[in-house]
Image (spheres, grey):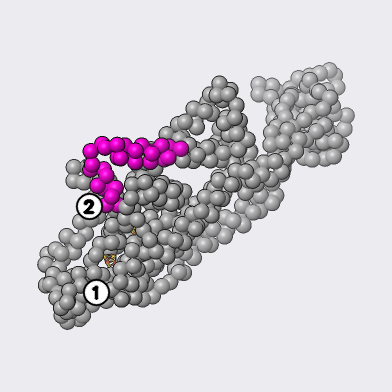
Amino acid sequence: MNDIEQLYQDSETFRDHLATVDKKGKRIWIYPKKPAGWFYKVRTYTSWLLLAILIGMPFIKINGEPFMLFNVLEGKFILFGIVFTPQDLHLFALAMVTLMVFIVLFTVVFGRLFCGWVCPQTIFMEMVFRKIEYWIEGDANQQRKLDKEPWTSDKIIKKGSKHIIFFLIAVLIANIFLTYIIGVDQVGKIISEPINMHVVGFAAMLIFSGLFYGVFAFMREQVCTTICPYGRMQGVLLVPDSIVVHYDFVRGEPRGKIKKTNPVSDIQQEVAQAALKSANGQDTIAESPIKILGDCIDCKLCVQVCPTGIDIRNGTQLECVNCTACIDACDGVMDKVSRPRGLIRYDSYNGIQKGKRHLLNTRVIAYSAVLVILIVFQAFLLGTRNSVETLVLKTPGQLYNVVDDIYYRNVYNWEVINKTAEDIQNIEFKLVGVPGSRLEVVGTKENIISPKQGLAKGVMMLDIPKTAMKTTKRKIKIEVYSNGKLIDEATTNFLGPIK
Ligand code: SF4
Ligand code: SF4
């Protein structure tokens, strides 16, 4: 191994450990410097909009049903006003697969853009909790100093008020979270009615509040770097053409502090030669001595603002949530040293190394084709989906009965599933295509009702003339009516010996 290879091996050591864990395995607490700049400003406005949508969405109702609901307890899901009942599990699963493919495609093209701009974890952490922390405890250095100080009354007031506010916001987040699971009406009841009427709901609220408080007060970036599965997937999803937050190593290296004479150390020359050699894929440039420094003045501001504690100059790393704080920090530095902005910017590896950006590559085309097929298929299934679904199934353990000399009898369990937003009234069944047959709903009430987003069920008996049995298993059709209007039909089998 020659010196330059050794140098590169050494420079890859950041990949051997997490930036937030020391050699003894102890957590290194990150004190990111407060970001400032164009991206931070735009992200702040964007986060206000997204928070308003997140908080406001559970209050939006279509035909009395929430716009979005993920009621895993009752198996009821509503996506953009479309209700999915347990009978639509295949449609919901397909929608989830479609979403996954979309995320994969989006990541291949734009990397972790979602994490930095849309993910609720980043938005709450960086735009809510972190801002409160800066407001109460000051910027990174002041926070560091405060943590080292003994417990004076000032420190107790600052820490105490911060954690009280954190917990109250965590309670709010827990309530928002629950509105997506059990609906805003149910959450309203838990809040307004006596606790003993909603012990389970209240307990869930407390548990989630504690969970969110723990996440935002203590776990923080660990959620993104070690828990979130999306972060783990980056290694297989990103390609050299993916647009991510990137350090322009061609322009920035060799890095070094600005000095009057701009002296360059031997080691910097070696790094620069190797960087250019690797960038150009040939040896010729490496042979020419490089006597000037790149644009990176090694101020390390980009590292100081990073909420996950990494150095973006080491290249794309899975800890990077594309929060753009380092872009803003570096742009500010470039302004001060009168060099062009964008030393850290949204770009692809190929864009930086070769100056060529290709949004369309084989992976993107393949994923796009799969996504289009899935969307079309999903739209077809949704478009042809019945809003009423009837199931008529033979009652288990029953074959057939001989009623008399004329009839055989089969007993069935029936269900009428109502996916609409209104009750279905006066349900009736008619067996069609078998002259002389009889149908009786056991324990018939005056008015059979299938409630909205619910179901009606019961037992029915079918009598069919023995002479109608040409095979031992006859397919039959049952029509379902509501207020005299045909709303659905179901097919089933009738069993009986051939006469
Ligand atoms: S902020 Fe810019 S100039 Fe400063 S160390 Fe980072 S990349 Fe280099
Ligand atoms: S490297 Fe830059 S974009 Fe990535 S997490 Fe750190 S500050 Fe944010």
Q: Where is residue 189 in the image (x, y as percent from the top left)?
A: 61, 30
Q: Is the distance from the Cβ of mark 2 to the nearest ligand 2 atom less than 8 Å?
A: no
Where ligand 2 lies, by quadrant?
bottom left
Q: Distance from label 2 to label 1 (Cα)?
A: 27 Å
Q: How dense is the environment of label 2, judged by Cα within 10 Å: few (below 14), some, or many (20 and up)?
A: few
Residue at point 14%, 74% (across, down)? 264
The amino acid pointed to by label 1 is Gly
- Which element carries disc 2, helix, strand or loop? helix
For the question of whether residue 180 can be seen, the reply is: yes
Q: From what the image shows, is residue 14 above or below residue 177?
A: below
- Of 161 and 499, the residue lying toward us: 161
Residue at point 18%, 64% (across, down)? 8
Q: From what the image shows, is residue 204 above or below residue 93?
A: above
Q: Where is residue 253 in the image (x, y as percent from the top left)?
A: 24, 71
For the question of whether residue 212 can be seen, the reply is: no
The amino acid pointed to by label 2 is Asp
Q: Where is residue 106 in the image (x, y as percent from the top left)?
A: 47, 59
Q: How dense is the environment of label 1, judged by Cα within 10 Å: few (below 14), some, or many (20 and up)?
A: some
Determine which of the numbered discs, if any, sits on residue 16 in the image.
2
Say whether residue 417 is magenta. Answer: no
Determine which of the numbered discs, if any, sits on residue 294 in the image.
1
**Is the stretch drawn in magenta largely helix, strand or loop?**
helix
Say whether residue 155 is magenta. Answer: yes
| Residue at the right extreme of this rendering | 436
Q: Give the range drawn in magenta.
A: 140-168
For marks 2 and 1 on the same chain, the one whose residue lies earlier in the sequence: 2
